[in-house]
Image: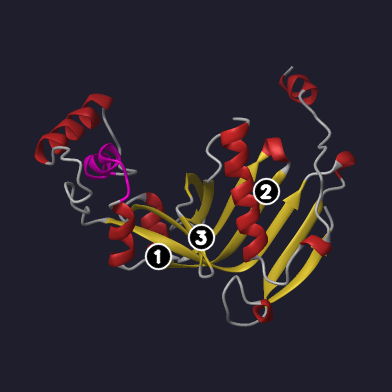
């Protein structure tokens, strides 16, 4: 019965596809353009919730894969960035094995972006600059949460939040909540970038940029572009 219900949900992807003549020699311009298009569609049509939701896959101490969804908070020629607790599961896994695969997926647009590569921890200045832009409640939540640890009851979390809120009341200033000591961020220094565009009859387009030399996501000499079978 489950298989029948899942089969009934099958759709034929009717995306516009992706041709090589639309793909630059280095991936950053089109990656930015796709993200901007997803954000714009989220505002205009509402069918792309959380357009910067980023799946982050790591490997744990036993070699088993682990994945979670965070928010993409910065993207430049150095790579995509995300933030969170350094003592969280992802923080511990990245400290032990600084490699990750990340993806952005927009089903209503029949588009996805994948990247994989080494991960570097962001410096404290970059982390604090981002932390100051977060809403007061999110900054309080970063202090209250012992991310990834076992929680006996939600009331414990809510009590921790109220305690932190009393300690650092909202004054309207970005400095009213200090940066938690074990809160940080990471950048993926990609060795591979893939854009996927859904097409009818499962004849999808997959364009891949593989790193062939040092350089940023905006440097053509650092990349070799190719097409993959769907």
| Residue numbers of the magenta segment | 133-146
Mark 3–mark 1 Cα distance, whole angstroms, equals: 24 Å
Residue beneath the point at 71% across and 56% down: 195
Residue 218 lies within the magenta run: no
216 sits to left or right of 74: right
Tags 3 and 1 touching, CB below 8 Å: no
Q: Residue furthest top?
A: 1
Q: Is residue 65 visible?
A: no
Q: From the viewer's perspective, is the residue at label 2 or at label 1 nearer?
A: 2
218 sits to left or right of 11: left
Q: Is residue 214 visible?
A: yes
Q: From the viewer's perspective, is the residue at label 2 or at label 3 nearer?
A: 3
Of pointers 3 and 1, the one earlier in the residue sequence: 3
Residue 139 lies within the magenta run: yes
Q: How crowded is the residue under tag 3: few (<14 C-alpha within 10 Å), some, or many (20+)?
A: some
Q: To which quarter of the image does residue 227 belong?
A: bottom right
Q: Which residue is mark 2?
A: 112
Give the camera-side residue of 147 and 184. 184
Instruction: Please tell me whether the stretch drawn in magenta is mainly helix, strand or loop.
Output: helix
Q: Which residue is mark 3?
A: 75
Give the camera-side residue of 120 and 123. 123
Q: Secondary structure at mark 1?
A: helix
Q: Position of residue 177 (x, y in %)?
A: 18, 47
Q: Which residue is mark 1?
A: 96
Give the camera-side residue of 175 and 118. 175
Mark 2–mark 1 Cα distance, whole angstroms, equals: 28 Å
Mark 2–mark 3 Cα distance, whole angstroms, equals: 16 Å
């Amino acid at each position: 019965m489950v298989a029948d219900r899942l089969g009934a949900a099958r759709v034929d992807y009717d995306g516009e596809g992706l041709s090589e003549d639309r793909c630059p020699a280095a991936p950053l311009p089109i990656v930015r353009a796709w993200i901007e298009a997803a954000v714009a569609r989220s505002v205009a049509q509402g069918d792309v919730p959380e357009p910067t939701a980023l799946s982050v896959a790591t490997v744990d101490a036993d070699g088993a894969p682990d994945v979670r969804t965070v928010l993409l908070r910065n993207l430049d020629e150095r790579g995509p960035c995300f933030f969170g607790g350094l003592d969280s599961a992802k923080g511990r896994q990245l400290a032990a094995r600084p490699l990750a695969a990340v993806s952005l997926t927009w089903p209503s647009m029949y588009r996805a972006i994948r990247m994989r590569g080494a991960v570097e921890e962001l410096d404290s200045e970059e982390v604090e600059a981002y932390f100051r832009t977060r809403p007061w409640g999110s900054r309080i939540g970063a202090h209250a949460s012992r991310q990834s640890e076992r929680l006996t009851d939600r009331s414990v979390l809510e009590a921790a939040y109220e305690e932190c809120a009393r300690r650092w009341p909202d004054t309207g200033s970005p400095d009213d909540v200090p940066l938690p000591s074990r809160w940080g961020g990471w950048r993926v220094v990609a060795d591979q970038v893939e854009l996927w565009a859904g097409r009818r009859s499962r004849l999808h387009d997959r364009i891949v940029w593989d790193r062939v030399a040092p350089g940023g996501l905006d440097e053509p000499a650092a990349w070799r572009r190719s097409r993959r079978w769907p």
